[in-house]
Image (cartoon, helix red, strand yellow):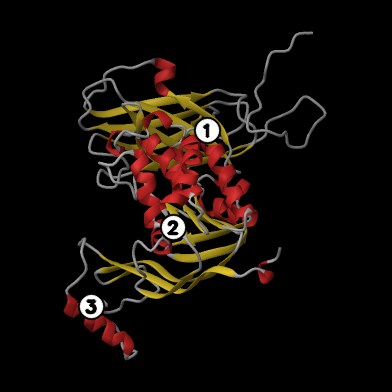
Amino acid sequence: MSSESRPPVIQVQDVRKRYRLGVTDRSMVADELASVWAGLRGKRDPHTRVGGSLSDQRVGDYFWSLRGLSFEVFEGDILGLIGRNGAGKSTLLKLLSRITPPTSGTIRMRGRVSSLLEVGTGFHPELTGRENIYLNGAIMGMRHAEIDSKLDAIIAFSGIEHHMDTPIKRYSVGMKIRLGFAVAAHLDPDILIVDEVLAVGDAEFQRKCLGSMRDVASAGRTVIFVSHSMASVQSLCSRAIWLDKGAIRMDGATEPVIREYLQECSPQDREQVWSAANAPGTDEVRLMGIRAISDRADGAFTIGHGISMELDLDNRSITDTDLNIQLIVRTGTDSIAFISDLTEAIGTALWPIGSNKVTCIIPPDLLNDGGYRVSVLFQRRGNRHFLVTDALSFDMQEGPRKGAWFMKWEGAVRPKLKWIR
């Protein structure tokens, strides 16, 4: 069914969202009134820095997280929101979920909205899982009898039926996600809003969630889905919006939007080095640099030569052996080519305080020709410590062939295996 024959359930018109830098609360009432009064008279905001412009995200002491967004979402749509960290995706979801109002512009929504934004959002930590199901349903305006009729389905979908009478504060992250999605998807929402939290769940639960979102859309309801997994967006969504610095960069069919996004967002350097102030990480450990080095004499990246992935770390306070690192190598279409795990390869050991260098060797005759992007995942105590997405990228070039096939081989890897004749 075309969008023209379906009613819009979400209408966003020239929406902007502003935050004040350096403070967590709003500015003084007098300042806000002065800004509003200036806007009503068509005058310049008196708190705008001289030379500032609304085309920039930062204006004086304010940061414009969203800048002039306008779009419509129709009944039964599954819309994917993509973009870099800080592009404004989570801010937009908070506005759509009515958690925070826009600074200017209008948002019109028709129907009951159910959101799964952050782990534990909407849950009372002292209440049990069962009690929180009823609490969430009541917040959405459902009667007790309606929730009763769906309780068994919610519990079964979550897969944590043995913990329903345990307080939420004792739940793991994964258990909160399972219950949160089960509640959000089963309380008959007209609009279901799901953020990146599904990335924390296991593979089986992710498949269940994607299937459930398809079911919601097939029943004539609407889904807004945010994810950094382009494979998930492409498999689930027929339409995508690419947000860039708080504005819509591209809106259209999913495949071309993702293709343009990946082409621009993939870093082209084979090396990244950060200063101590800007290095990604935590107070315990930071990634200071990463580089990909070919073992070929001229430095070219060809499938017949190996690659050394060198990581420079600054260990600031870890005095135990509990630090693991994974390299996640993805293809140009965002499929995972492989993941290499430090602890699985060499076990655990103490990390000296200060500078450390770690090297992972990608052997020759493993990767196929094409483009690859590398992310680095740091883990502690069995959980994600921090993730550096798309830390670098490289292109593998074709080498000489002995066979008669001269077109591109399919697949992310092309190992030279042993054959016996």
Question: Which residue shows up at 64% across the image and 32% down it?
Answer: 368
Q: Do labels 3 and 2 touch, CB within 8 Å?
A: no
Position in image of residue 15 (x %, y %):
43, 72
Q: Three-letter amino acid code at disc 3?
A: Glu
At mark 1, the secondary structure is helix
Q: Do labels 1 and 2 touch, CB within 8 Å?
A: no
Position in image of residue 61 (x %, y %):
24, 69
> Sequence-wise, which precedes: disc 3 or disc 2?
3
**Is residue 319 shown above or below 192?**
above
Question: Which residue shows up at 67% across the image and 34% down it?
Answer: 398
Using the numbered discs, state the Cα–Cα distance from disc 3 to disc 1 in whole angstroms. 47 Å
Can you identify the residue that label 2 sits on?
A: 89
Q: Quadrant of residue 170?
A: top left
> Sequence-wise, which precedes: disc 3 or disc 1?
3
* Quarter containing the C terminus: top right
Can you identify the residue that label 1 sits on?
A: 203
Q: Is residue 132 left or right of residue 243?
A: left
Can you identify the residue that label 3 sits on?
A: 32
Q: Is residue 345 left or right of residue 241?
A: left
Position in image of residue 293 (x %, y %):
48, 32
